[in-house]
Image (cartoon, grey):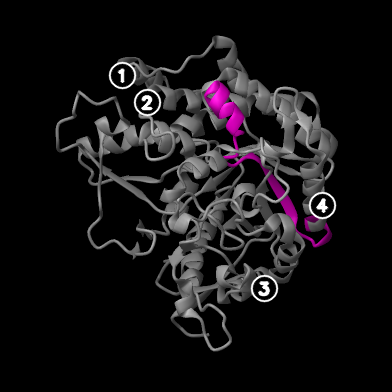
Amino acid sequence: MDKEEKTIKIPDGFMIGAAASAWQTEGWSGKKAHQDSYIDLWYKKNKQVWHNGVGPAIATDFYNRYKEDITLMKEIGLTHYRTSINWSRFLLDYEKATVDEEYAGYMDDVINELIKNGVEPMICLEHYELPAALFEQYGGWGSKHVVDLFVKYAEKVFDRYGDRVKNWFTFNEPIVVQTRVYLDAIRYPFEQNTKKWMQWNYNKALATAKVIQLFKEKGYGEKNGSKIGVILNPEVTYARSTAKHDQEAARMYDLFFNRIFLDPSIKGEYPKELFEVMEKHKIAFEYTEDELQVIKENTVDYVGLNLYYPHRVKARSTAWNDRTPFHPSYYYEMFELPGRKMNPFRGWEIYPQIMYDMAMRMKEEYGNIEWFIAENGMGVENEYQFKNEENIIQDDYRIEFISEHLKWLIRAVEEGANCKGYMLWAFSDNVSPMNAFKNRYGLVEINLEENRNRRLKKSAYWYKEIIKNRELLVKNDDFYK
């Protein structure tokens, strides 16, 4: 071994897997005309904003090729695979929670195939797959009725798969859709409405608590040894400086974008200051004391955290335009760190220390609750340019990215963080909102020019070795001194 390299032991029982979602992989095969999700609706209404017009219609065709993909998962040695059930397709009637046996049977087959191949399924109930009918009829997650319909859907799912699935999650990144739609107005239907944004945030937290309440009342965990949580995407936030004004900007950013889900999900309550700020800016969500009690009594068993890059903020240097609706950036501006390392394809800073810093926060502020990295990865454009003579993509940049992030994560575990694993985004290249297949994230290449044929990248063979040997070779940069 090179003296500039160091071997780090991956802890026993530490899961090394990969993630994806239903809508980003399945395609529309077998989907009934009335089973569009919000994503499908957006794509149909606004196809021109999706890269090269590609969207969820075919995706990776996982619906028809799941056996092929699960064989590759087994070859790589994934311990776990996280995906979602498409709510919009699982039911024929959302009000009555009538199950679509064709789609439900497909999910039976996927779950059974994963287990047969030694891959533990981790299932999320909603990964942006809100039924379009509920979005159009009730305003989606702005409606308490939709919350109740989600609980009815969850019950059907638990009854169907609870004997085999041990790891459940209510949402993946519950803050994202409404942030893009109602806060920043960059996705269909392009409505800037901060109060509506806040109501969606609250109703999703309430939905998580109500589903957990159902989960406990029906004894799913006791009967099957399963757990339920939520997958959040906290934005690890750094102030530009130690100055009071910059620190305050970072604190307010954290309140709006991190604590708004971390606190009710884990602590069972919202920060008192959030209510004060919402009242000040007339963006308060509608709630009842009974609902807050449900949230208090039904916190998560564990959480998945999606971490990709740091968020850096500074105090505002320009006056706020009072003629525009309130936006949390009233309290901050984004800050670009000079000399930062960048992923030039995705436009994101690369700063692996976010793993350690978030881990210490979970340990110190959130009771050291059990958690894991549910997503982390690197999107790169035009990866075909890195193919070798054997036609295998030489994605050494992805290997370095994963190594450096895992290094910081395992250091945190050694210092007592209750982190149980790492899930790479993603198992294969897949469709992302608007970017479609532009930026590739997978261990497995999806070749759009060759009928979406699959081929392992160099990173897949490397990932296989670290799973097999439980060792990680990293740069010896005095990291542990």
Please name the residue that numbered disc 2 is placed on: 194
Residue 134 lies in the magenta stretch? yes
- Depth check: give the residue in front, 449 or 302: 449
Please name the residue that numbered disc 4 is placed on: 109
Asked which quadrant contains residue 285, the reply is: top left
> Residue 248 appears at what percent x and percent y?
27, 34
Distance from label 2 to label 3 (Cα)? 49 Å
Camera-near label (1 vs 3) is 1
Q: Earlier in the sequence, mark 1 or mark 2?
A: 2
Please name the residue that numbered disc 3 is placed on: 469
Q: Which amino acid lies under the numbered mark 2 shown in the image of this protein?
A: Thr
Q: Which mark is residue 281?
A: 1
Residue 177 lies in the magenta stretch? no
Camera-near label (2 vs 3) is 2
Q: Is residue 134 left or right of residue 247?
A: right
Q: Residues within 10 Å of mark 4 (few under 14, many from 20)?
A: some
SS at mark 4? helix
Residues at badges 1 and 2 in contact (C-beta under 8 Å)? yes
Distance from label 1 to label 2 (Cα)? 10 Å
Distance from label 4 to label 3 (Cα)? 30 Å
Give the magenta part as a residue range.
Answer: 114-139
Q: Earlier in the sequence, mark 1 or mark 3?
A: 1
Q: Which amino acid lies under the numbered mark 1 shown in the image of this protein?
A: His
The residue at the far left in this view is: 318
